[in-house]
Image (spheres, rainbow, N blue to C red):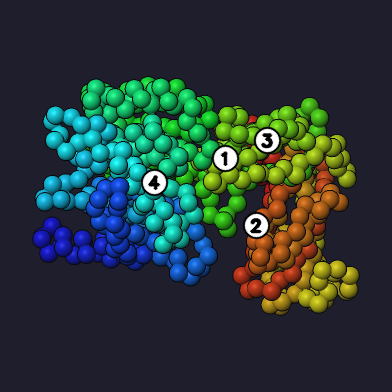
Amino acid sequence: MSHRSILWLLAGLLAFAQAHAELAPPVHDALTSTALAQTRVIDVYLPKDADKDPAQRYETLYVLDGDWNTELVVQTVDFLQGRGLLPPIIVVGVPNHFDDGANSRDHDLTPSPQPHEARSGGAAQFMAFFKTELIPYVNKRYPSNGVNLVHGHSYGGLFLAYVIANDPSIFDGYLLLDPAMWWNDKEVAKALEAKLSSMPTRGKAVFIAGRSGPAFKGMGVDSLQAAFAKAPSDLPWKVVDYPAESHDSMKFKATYDALRFMYRGYVKPEDHVDVSPDAGIVVAGKPVTVGANTQMFDIHYTTDGSEPNRLSPTMDRTLAIADPAHTRLKSISTRGEYDRDITLHLQMGSVIKPERAAQPDEKTPIHYAYYDEKSWPALNGKPFSEGEIEKTDPTDPRERYAARFERHYVIPSDGYYVVVLRSSEDAKLTFAGREIGRTQAPKDPRHRALVLPLQAGIYTAKLDFLHTEKNAEFQVLIYGFDEKESSWTKEVK
């Protein structure tokens, strides 16, 4: 590839990143610090749409060594937010201060004076700067909600471990990347080990990244891992070691993983966290299996009616529910900021008997009736067209009309079946004389599903709907449970 081609490629990637940016260009700000006797520069990145709702408030992520780490963090935040894996947040880059050409990080980020670092030992003052000056300044001047996370690499990670050991209340989420825990014979890890058992846990989380092999011990990350083994059981913390990475290169993977950990359980407000089927009938002694895609969140449950917490058992894709009245489900996020209760609409009941037995090779055509749209939703007038069809999609007689489709379904064997209504329009589905659900477009486009205990035989399904859009979609689906796949995938045709 030529140099010109490479330049065009880089320009294209830059344009892509800018076009999909979720953060606005930085605000360059500064404040005078009494604790440090310096004027400190900061770079503040606000959500790009923050000005559209002045009342909205956001979590804030502070980045130590902002001179070289802020850009990586901002790009990672942009990527995750653009894919719905992160809420809008504020990023505050905190560059190092240069005094007569000397970098302040060796002073600010180290906890004690050491002969090999002439300016070391200023962590206490830097911690005071954050607590009494920088965080209050940002909270007052920018739309912060008071929840603060912090990203630190190397000496920055050492500093964050020092903060946890001395005043963990300053931040809520700690992202420690390859922290230099070897400092002064691992003094900070020893202090942590003595204090972690009493660390406050509400809203807190700690992510620690190291490198596999000798570097894990050489950086002293092993001592940090040992210290956190004594942390309270309800403190979310995680240690990850990365193979075949350098001290600097591991930041790329670790920043991504740390943010995913801190925001695990976040789901966009317009999305739903639920299980399926979440409504229907459970027969005593025959549990119903519900499922959920738990890749993005953790669902904890209890079976005694108590509220689930992060120490409760975790649902792994499926869960058998025998007593819905005493089963409670909750999506629990890492720091508790995005917890959601999951309501079950299952209730105890009896097996539903069929209308009659099925005949060998019985055909089940669909009876349809079309009505003037003004007859919706009662459909009690005379249809202007009706008949029977073999398919579920007859030619629409008009662009706008109301309709009723009625069909017999052959249930092949005794067991639980999920009856599903999917519709982009107003619709109502009844099955075996029971209302399965209703949809109302456009405000409620989700599907409706009901699990029912059925015996082998014939059951009638009746779908009423209002057709107003050319490409409207209506579906009635019935699934049985596939024991081998442990999922509702056995479709009844």
| Three-letter code for the amino acid on which mark 4 is drawn | Lys
Element at badge 4? helix
Real-space Cα distance between discs 2 and 4? 46 Å
Q: Which residue is mark 4?
A: 131
For label 4, count other residues whose C-alpha is less than 10 Å away and answer few (under 14), some (14-19) or many (20+). some
Secondary structure of the residue carrying tag 3 is loop
394 lies above or below 156:
below
Q: Amino acid at mark 2?
A: Arg
The first of marks 4 and 1 along the sequence is: 4
Question: How far from the left and from the top, in percent, is residue 233?
Answer: 52, 26
Residue 307 numbered mark, or none: 3
- Residue at image x 81%, y 51%? 431
How far apart are labels 2 and 1 at the CA level?
23 Å
- Residue 247's spot in the image, x, y percent? 22, 36
**How far is mark 4 from mark 3, CA to CA?**
35 Å
Q: Which circle marks residue 188 in the picture?
A: none
Mark 2 / mark 4, whichever is N-terminal? 4
3 or 2: tag closer to the N-terminus: 3
Could you tell me how many numbered marks the image carries?
A: 4
Tell me, yes or no, if residue 271 can be seen here.
yes
Sequence-wise, which precedes: disc 1 or disc 3? 3
Quick check: can you spot residue 253? no
Residue at horizontal 16%, vertical 38%? 119
Q: Secondary structure at mark 2?
A: loop
Tell me: residue 398, above or below residue 421.
below
